[in-house]
Amino acid sequence: MIQKFADTFESIKKEFTLVFKKLFKGGNGVLKLTNPENLLETGIEIIAEPPGKKLSNIALLSGGEKTLTAISLLFAILNVKPVPFCILDEVEAALDEANVDTFGSFLQSKKDKSEFILITHKKRTMEYADTLYGITMQESGVSKIVRVELDDYQEK
């Protein structure tokens, strides 16, 4: 168990640095063990330095930077241990428009390995989807599911 944890941590650590740099278009993201001598009780520290910033504490990041850091960690884990599908519930809510585009483009680059189900209210995020599902209530108390295949509406 200790060896498997150590190997997996090292793989995720490498992937996190790569994904962080890609999503932030630079900077440095590092994962460190708080107690590397005792892998059964260690914690994991996230060091995130977006381009142009030198931070000592993740609490000093903006909400969008924290979100993009968490997304970097999530995708680092998915790169090491792919899954057939992944449900993301408003993970990009704190991102500004430019970072929503970065997230959407990155997500599209991963759709050949996993299917992503996104729950979102951001129209900009929806532009990166292949299919949209919505819930409408045309009469009081009666919900209806609406499906839109976006490939039908995108320019060829």
Image (spheres, rainbow, N blue to C red):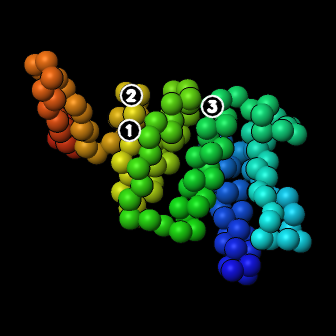
Task: Tell me residue 21's x, y (percent).
Answer: 68, 49
- For marks 2 and 3, the one nearer the N-term is 3
The answer to which quarter of the image holds residue 109 is bottom left
Quadrant of the drawing holding the C terminus? top left
- Location of residue 127 with respect to 115 vertically, above or below: above
Q: Seen in the image, is 67 located left or right of residue 3?
A: left
Q: Seen in the image, is 98 located left or right of residue 108?
A: right
Q: What distance separates the C-alpha of mark 3 from that of mark 1?
A: 18 Å
Task: Tell me residue 73's x, y (percent).
Answer: 63, 53
Q: Amino acid at mark 3?
A: Gly
Q: Mark 3 sits on what residue?
A: 64
Q: What distance separates the C-alpha of mark 2 from that of mark 1?
A: 7 Å
Q: Seen in the image, is 129 located left or right of residue 31?
A: left
| Classed neighbour count for the residue bearing mark 3: other residues with Cα under 10 Å, few (<14), some (14–19), many (≥20) | some
Q: Closer to the camera, 45 or 148?
A: 45
| Classed neighbour count for the residue bearing mark 1: other residues with Cα under 10 Å, few (<14), some (14–19), many (≥20) | some
Mark 1 residue element = strand
Mark 3 residue element = helix
Q: Mark 1 sits on what residue?
A: 119
- For marks 3 and 1, the one nearer the N-term is 3
Mark 3–mark 1 contact, CB under 8 Å?
no
The answer to which quarter of the image holds residue 151 is top left
Q: Residue at x 13, y 18 (%)?
A: 140
Q: Closer to the camera, 1 or 7?
A: 1
Q: Amino acid at mark 1?
A: Ile
Q: Residue at x 45, y 57 (%)?
A: 110
Q: Closer to the camera, 94 or 33?
A: 33
- Location of residue 90 with respect to 28 vertically, above or below: above
